[in-house]
Image (cartoon, coloured by chain):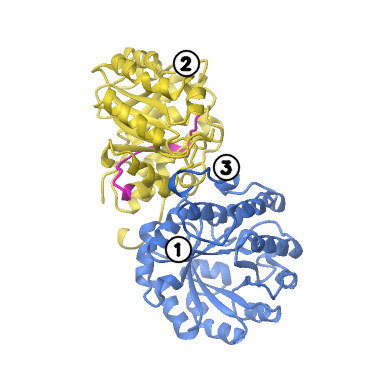
Chain colours: A yellow, B blue
C-alpha cells in the first residue's frame, strides 16, 4: 500500500485536440477535478494559439483559479516565450516538453531536440525562482516517426535537465502508447540521474497498455502519474496518439489494490460524465462507461 | 520467458451477442484463427437457438472444421442435452459453464448454481471418454447481480468438478470485467484444488483491466487464457458484460515481454480487420485500431 500522486491533465492534454472550449469552462473543469481530490491539475498551456487553437486563453484559465488552495495548477510551455507568458499569468508550476524524437520535436515545437535541449537554460532563466519545473520527455518509449528505438535520447535529456535545472522533476511521456512493462523497465533503468520515486509517467492508452504500464511502474517504485478524466487527450502533432490513461481507470484499480490517491472515484466519475457534453463526443474511458467495481473479497 | 496458451473464443463468445452469422462463415473465422497460429479455438456452442439465436447451427460449424489437424476445436455446452448434441456433432473438446452467481445461472442456463453443479455428473456421463472437458466458472470475480462477493462459490464449483470430472481442466471467467490483479490473486489462492499452471482465465475488458489482470496472473503461474480476436464478446445474459480481452492486445504485449504464444500477431490483425464486416460495427480492440508496436530497446 503506497501513496500515488495523480496529476490530471484533462484541461490541457485532454482538450488540446478538441474544438476550443472557452477558458472559463476549462477553469471549471480544473476546479471540479480539484474538488474530486486531485492535488495536481495541468490546467492550460502557453503555446501559439495559431498552432493549437484550443489552448488559446491560458491566462484566462489561470485568472479563474484560486491561488491560495492546496492544489498545484500546472501549465505547459514549449519554450522560453511560453514560460514568460506563464509567469506573467501567475503560473507557479511549469511543465516543459522536450521530445526524444527529432521528428516529433520539429512538428510540436518547430525545432530539433538539440535546439530544444539548448533552450532549457533560457526557460530556466525565464522561470527563475517563480515556479516549480517539470520536464516532460515526449516519445520516451517510441515515436510515431520511427526515430526513437532505444532510451539514449531520453537519457541525454535527463542528463541535461539535471545540469541546467537541478531542481526540476522529470516525467517520461508515452506520447503514442508504445510503452509496455518491459519498455518501462528498460527506460527507467537507463535513466540513472533520477530516483524512481521522484519520476513521473505520462501514459497514453493507444494500445490498451496504459494501466498495465502504470502497475508495472509502481512495482519499480514510480509514485507519480499523469492521467486525464475520461481518457481524453492526445497530441495534435503525433499521428495516432490515442487518449491519456483515464483518471477513473487508474484510480479504480489503485484503490482496489489498496493504494491511496486522495481522489474520490465517484466524484471523478461525475466530472467524467460531464465531458461528452464539453467535447461533443463520447470519451474513451471504460470505467466511465461501466462504472466502478462492486465489493469483492478481503479488500471489500 | 514462458509459453502462454491462447484459446480464441471469438467464433463463440465473440459472436454470441451479435446478429447471426451463418455457420460456414463462423467456421472460416475459426480456421483463419488457426492459420494465424492459435492452437485452441472455441468454435461454437450447443445451446437453445431460441435462447441464443446467433449460436444456432453449431453442428454446421463443426462439419466445416478439419478433424485431423493439431488444433483443438472447443464447443461450449450449458447442460447434458447440449453435451449430447456436441458429441453427436463430433466435438472432442467440450467447455461446460457453471456460474458462481445464482442470478446469472438462472438467466444463463435457467437453473440454480446448485442444480447446475448437480448436472455435472450427467454432463460427464453424456461426454464419456469422447471429449476433453473444461469447466468454466462464470462470474468467478463478481456478478452483475451483486451475488458474488467472495471466492466461496467458485471454490465449491472447483471442488465438485474435481470430484465428478477428475480429468477436466478449470477456467475462471471474469464475465463482466470486475476482476483486478488483487481479486485474481485472492481467487486463485482460494482454489487449492487446481494447480495454477493448469488453470485458465477467461477475461473481459469491461473496465479496461483485462490486460493488467492477465499479466498479474502470469506472475502467479497462470499459463492459459481465453481471448477473442477484435475484443468482441460478452454474454447476452450478463448486463454490461463488455468484450473479451482481445487476442491481438494480449499477444502483442506478451511477445514484447519475451513470452511465446505460437500466434502470428500480423495474421491475427488481418483476421481482426475482417471482423467489422462480419458483425457490422467497429470492434473494441485498441491494437486492432492502432497496429502493433515499433521495435524498441533490447527486446527489439
Does A234 appear in magenta?
yes
User: Residue B56: x percent and y percent?
Assistant: 71, 67
- Pair 3/1: label in front: 1
With respect to residue A231, does A125 lie above or below? above
Q: Which residue is mark 2?
A: A48
Q: Which residue is mark 3?
A: B290
State the residue at coordinates (32%, 36%).
A38
Is residue B240 in view from this perspective? no
Q: Chain of mark 1?
A: B
Q: Which residue is mark 1?
A: B2
With respect to residue B268, does A208 lie above or below? above
Q: CA distance from mark 2 to mark 1?
A: 50 Å
Q: Nearer the viewer, residue A290 or B8?
A: B8
Q: Are marks 2 and 1 in contact (CB under 8 Å)?
A: no
Does B52 appear in magenta?
no
Q: Chain of mark 3?
A: B
Magenta stretch, residue numbers: A218-235
Q: Chain of mark 2?
A: A
Question: Which element carries disc 3, helix, strand or loop?
Answer: helix
With respect to residue B286, does A275 lie above or below? above
User: Residue B168: x percent and y percent?
Assistant: 51, 79
Is residue B257 in view from this perspective? yes
State the residue at coordinates (45%, 30%).
A13
User: Residue B46: x percent and y percent?
Assistant: 66, 73
Q: Are marks 2 and 1 on the same chain?
A: no
Amino acid at each position: 500500500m503506497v501513496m500515488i500522486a495523480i496529476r490530471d491533465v484533462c484541461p490541457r492534454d485532454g482538450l488540446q485536440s478538441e474544438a476550443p472550449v472557452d477558458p472559463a469552462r476549462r477553469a471549471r473543469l480544473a476546479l471540479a477535478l480539484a474538488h474530486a481530490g486531485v492535488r495536481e491539475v495541468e490546467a492550460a498551456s502557453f503555446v501559439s494559439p495559431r498552432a493549437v487553437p484550443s489552448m488559446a486563453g491560458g491566462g484566462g484559465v489561470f485568472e479563474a483559479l484560486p491561488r491560495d488552495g492546496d492544489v498545484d495548477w500546472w501549465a505547459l510551455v514549449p519554450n522560453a516565450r511560453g514560460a514568460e507568458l506563464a509567469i506573467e499569468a501567475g503560473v507557479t508550476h511549469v511543465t516543459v516538453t522536450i521530445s526524444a524524437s527529432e521528428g516529433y520535436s520539429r512538428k510540436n515545437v518547430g525545432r530539433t531536440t538539440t535546439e530544444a535541449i539548448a533552450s532549457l537554460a533560457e526557460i530556466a532563466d525565464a522561470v527563475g525562482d517563480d515556479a516549480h519545473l517539470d520536464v516532460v520527455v515526449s516519445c520516451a518509449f517510441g515515436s510515431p516517426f520511427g526515430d526513437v528505438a532505444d532510451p539514449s535520447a531520453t537519457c541525454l535529456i535527463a542528463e541535461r535537465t539535471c545540469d541546467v535545472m537541478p531542481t526540476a522533476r522529470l516525467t517520461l511521456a508515452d506520447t503514442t502508447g508504445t510503452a509496455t512493462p518491459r519498455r518501462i523497465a528498460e527506460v527507467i533503468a537507463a535513466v540513472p540521474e533520477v530516483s524512481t520515486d521522484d519520476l513521473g509517467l505520462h501514459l497514453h492508452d493507444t494500445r490498451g497498455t496504459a494501466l498495465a504500464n502504470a502497475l508495472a511502474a509502481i512495482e519499480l517504485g514510480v509514485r507519480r502519474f499523469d492521467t486525464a478524466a475520461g481518457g481524453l487527450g492526445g497530441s495534435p502533432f503525433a499521428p495516432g496518439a490515442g487518449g491519456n490513461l483515464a483518471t477513473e481507470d487508474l484510480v479504480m484499480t489503485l484503490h482496489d489494490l489498496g493504494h491511496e490517491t486522495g481522489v474520490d472515484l465517484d466524484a471523478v466519475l461525475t466530472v467524467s460524465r460531464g465531458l461528452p457534453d464539453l467535447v461533443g463526443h463520447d470519451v474513451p474511458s471504460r470505467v466511465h462507461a461501466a462504472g466502478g467495481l462492486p465489493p469483492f473479497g478481503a479488500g471489500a
